Structures are given as C-alpha cells and as structure tokens.
Image (cartoon, rainbow, N blue to C red):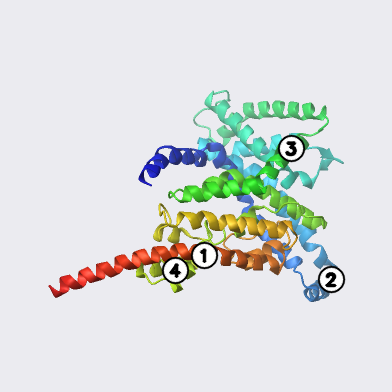
C-alpha cells in the first residue's frame, strides 16, 4: 500500500491537478453559470406538470388557459432555453479571469462570433440556437474567441490609448483589432459551412462532435469508466468528482437538456445517463454511496470511534455530502474499505441503468434538480415518477448489504484496539 501511495503521489496527483487546473477546463466550467436558471426553470416545470389530474384541474380552474402556457411558452425559453447563450457569457468570463485579461471584450466578441455562425430564419434567429442543441458550438466559440483576444493582447496587435484614458474606454479600443479579426474569421467560417451539406456550423458540430461525444459519455461503459476514476481518485484523497465532472459534465448536461426538449414535445426520451442521473445514482449519498454506511456505523457498530464518525457524517450524507466519512472513518487509504467503496456505486449504476433500460423505471426527464436533494425525493423528481425514488431506496439498501461485512470487520478491529487501550489505561490507574 505504501508503494502504491508513493506512485500515486508521484504520477497521478500531478496529472489530476493538471487536468483540473487546465485553463480550458476552468473556462468550460463557466457553463455552470446557467445552473441557477436551469434549476428555477426545472422547478417551474415540476409545478406546471405535477402528475395529478386533480391538481391540474384545480390550477386550470384558478388560472384558466394561462396555466397550460405560462411554463413552457414563457419560463422555459427564458431559462433552460438560453443555456447556450449563457455559456457564451460564463465561459469567456472564466477563461479571461484565468488568463488575467479584461473580461468584457471576450464576452462581447464571443456573442458576436456566435451570431455570425447561426442561421437567420425569417429575418431573425431561432430560439433553438440558444438551447442545448448548440451548447458545444457555444463552448467552442467562446474558448476560441477568448484565445484570439488573449493572443492579440499578448502580441500587442491592438490600438493603444494614452495612459490618461480611463481603462474602460481603452479596453474597448484594444478590442477593435481583435473584433475585426473575429468578424473576418467567423464570417468566413459561416460561408464555408454554407457551401457544405451541413449548411451551418451548428449542424456540423452537433452531428460530428456533440452527438457522438454525448453518446459515448452517456453510455453504460462510459459511465462506469467515469465512476472508476471518480472512486479511484477519492481513495487517495483527491477530489475525484471535480476531476471527472470537469470532463463529463458538458456531455451529461447536454443529454439532460435533450431529454427535457423531448419531454416538452411529448417524444420518447433518449438518454438514461444525464447530469441528474449521475447526481442521484452514481453520487447518491456522496461518492461510494456511503449513506447506508453511516446508519450501519451508528446503529450496527460497537466501536466508539466508528459510532461517533457515523453520527457526524449521517446528516451531510442525507444531502449527498460525504467528506466527513471519507476523511473521518477514513475511507482514504483504508485497504478494508476499498472494495465496497468501488463496488457499491458500480452496483447502483448497473441496477438503475437496467431498471430504466428495461422500462421498469422511467428515464430522467431532464428536469434539473439540486444535487443536494435527499433520496427518495431526488429520484422521484428527476424521473417524474415515484418509481425513481423507490429505485434510489433499492440501490441504497444494496449498498448497505455490500458495506456491512467490511465495516463490521473494521469495527471489530477498532473495538479490539479501544478495549486494549482502556485495559492499559486501567492498569496505569491501579499502579
């Protein structure tokens, strides 16, 4: 174990830090700026589409015809329907801060470049180009434009104003040359794609990049790989969720938003693995599905050390936060707990994926639920069915069965150590 720790510290720790600290990964996290409106919009969908005929009849009686349109026709386009557009603000902002350059010009130029690429329909722009179907295009445009601006500033290919000019004004003049180059480049890209069978850059990115990547990242093997690296990094005290989410979140989010679009249209949902699926099945109770472990520690163990950690960890665990048990038990570098820590989330993924694949439990609707939502509420809301919540309880029960023999083994070990320490202390008192 010590040799493995040395190898991890020498090779894996720097690699994971490099991935998490990569400026493009940090920039892409600007997509998360849309999370507040995604959650608010999703909560409105839950309220508007609550699956109860009596409830729907009552609300229609109170609000009239407006009840059937207020959410999907007004709130949805203004919140969830703007995810790509919001990313054009959040990603340049994050990346510009990482590059230590002014943040407003990259945001402005990213918006301009994006509108140069998307098609004009009947003299205007389609709201579809602001939604999930164009998310990857928005991300690529934002990163590319910000890099152009950064490179031109670094190379001093800008218009310099006297020092007496306020920085807000001088920054805008500095952006004139990059703005000209961005216009030329993206106008050229637009005409190039117009001459192809794809017609638009957004269709090309969706068909050739976004769709294939999403299919891979949301497949069962892709999900199991993501879970493996998440658990593996946590075993050595590295925040695996941050590393894995940096890579997979755009794919999981895109899948969720595609499901939501299909749900809105009354069409068949395509994806099982979405951001909410991973939150409420892969990360249920925290990485490793440790929530049932907390209850076993509290009520099924005799060691004072284990019982006290269980009491501290159970409340955060209910809300899917499990750092207290990972570092308090600990699970980190604990050879006894390695097997269940890996095995529990694998079983959860396999069981939940199979239950949805075979039609026992509905697919995630794409409605965004706060990741701290406790089970079984989270599973119920994400699928729009009580079966989703019941499935969470099933996988938690299975995780408890997996953890039980291992925590009892550790409990016996710690109990023996505590009894030996108490015996030694009593001897010293008698002497």
Q: Distance between the residues labelled 1 and 3?
A: 47 Å
Question: Residue 392 — which label?
Answer: none
Q: As drawn, is 53 to the left or to the right of 424?
A: right
Q: Can residue 334 be seen in this view?
A: yes
Q: Write down the residue under mark 2.
A: 64
Residue 234 in the image: x percent, y percent?
A: 47, 51
**Which dot marks residue 115?**
3
Q: Can residue 279 be seen in this view?
A: no
Tally the marks: 4
First in sequence, mark 2 or 1: give its number.
2
51 relative to 77, above or below: below
Q: Residue furthest right?
A: 122
| Residues at marks 3 and 4, CA–CA distance in whole angstroms | 56 Å
For label 2, the SS is helix
- The CA distance from mark 4 to mark 2 is 53 Å
**Labelled pair 1, 4 in contact (Cβ < 8 Å):** no
Crowding at label 3, few (<14), some or many (≥20) Cα neighbours within 10 Å?
some
Q: Which of marks 1 and 3 is in front?
A: 1
Task: Tell us which disc is closer to us: 1 or 4.
Answer: 4
Dot 3: what SS?
helix
Q: Residue at x 40, y 38 (%)?
A: 10
What secondary structure is marked by label 1? helix
Q: Is residue 16 left or right of residue 384?
A: left
Q: Is tag 1's residue or tag 3's residue first in the polypeptide sequence?
A: 3
Cβ–Cβ under 8 Å for marks 4 and 2: no
Mark linked to residue 291: 1
Report the residue marked by disc 4: 297
Q: Residue at x 55, y 46 (%)?
A: 244
Between the C-alphas of marks 2 and 1, the distance is: 44 Å
The x and y percentages for residue 328 are 40, 60
């Amino acid at each position: 174990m010590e040799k493995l720790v040395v190898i991890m510290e020498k090779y894996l720790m720097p690699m994971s830090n490099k991935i998490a600290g990569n400026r493009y990964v940090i920039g892409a996290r600007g997509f998360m700026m849309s999370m507040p409106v995604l959650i608010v919009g999703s909560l409105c969908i839950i309220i508007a589409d609550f699956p109860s005929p009596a409830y729907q009849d009552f609300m229609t009686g109170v609000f009239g015809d407006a009840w059937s349109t207020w959410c999907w026709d007004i709130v949805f386009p203004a919140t969830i329907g703007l995810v790509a557009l919001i990313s054009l603000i959040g990603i340049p902002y994050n990346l510009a801060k990482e590059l230590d350059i002014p943040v407003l010009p990259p945001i402005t130029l990213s918006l301009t470049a994006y509108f140069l690429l998307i098609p004009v329909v009947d003299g205007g722009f389609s709201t579809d180009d602001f939604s999930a179907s164009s998310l990857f295009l928005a991300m690529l445009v934002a990163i590319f434009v910000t890099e152009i601006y950064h490179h031109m500033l670094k190379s001093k290919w800008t218009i310099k104003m006297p020092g007496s000019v306020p920085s807000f004004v001088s920054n805008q003049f500095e952006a004139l040359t990059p703005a000209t180059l961005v216009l030329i480049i993206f106008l050229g890209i637009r005409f190039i794609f117009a001459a192809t069978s794809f017609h638009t850059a957004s269709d090309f990115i969706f068909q050739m990049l976004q769709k294939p990547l999403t299919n891979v990242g949301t497949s069962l093997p892709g999900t199991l790989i993501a879970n493996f690296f998440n658990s593996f990094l946590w075993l050595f005290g590295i925040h695996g969720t941050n590393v894995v989410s940096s890579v997979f979140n755009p794919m999981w989010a895109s899948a969720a938003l595609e499901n939501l679009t299909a749900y809105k249209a009354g069409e068949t949902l395509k994806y099982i693995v979405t951001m909410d699926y991973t939150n409420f099945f892969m990360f249920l109770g925290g990485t490793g599905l440790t929530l049932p472990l907390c209850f076993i520690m509290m009520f099924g163990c005799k060691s004072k050390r284990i019982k006290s950690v269980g009491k501290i960890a159970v409340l955060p665990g209910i809300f899917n936060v499990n750092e207290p048990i990972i570092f308090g038990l600990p699970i980190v570098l604990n050879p006894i707990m390695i097997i269940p820590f890996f095995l529990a989330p694998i079983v959860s993924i396999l069981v939940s994926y199979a239950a949805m694949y075979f039609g026992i439990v509905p697919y995630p609707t794409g409605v965004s639920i706060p990741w701290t939502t406790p089970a079984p509420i989270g599973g119920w809301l994400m699928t729009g069915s009580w079966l989703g919540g019941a499935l969470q309880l099933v996988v938690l029960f299975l995780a408890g069965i997996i953890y039980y023999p291992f925590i009892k083994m550790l409990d016996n070990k710690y109990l023996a150590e505590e009894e030996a320490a108490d015996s030694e202390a009593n001897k010293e008192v008698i002497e």
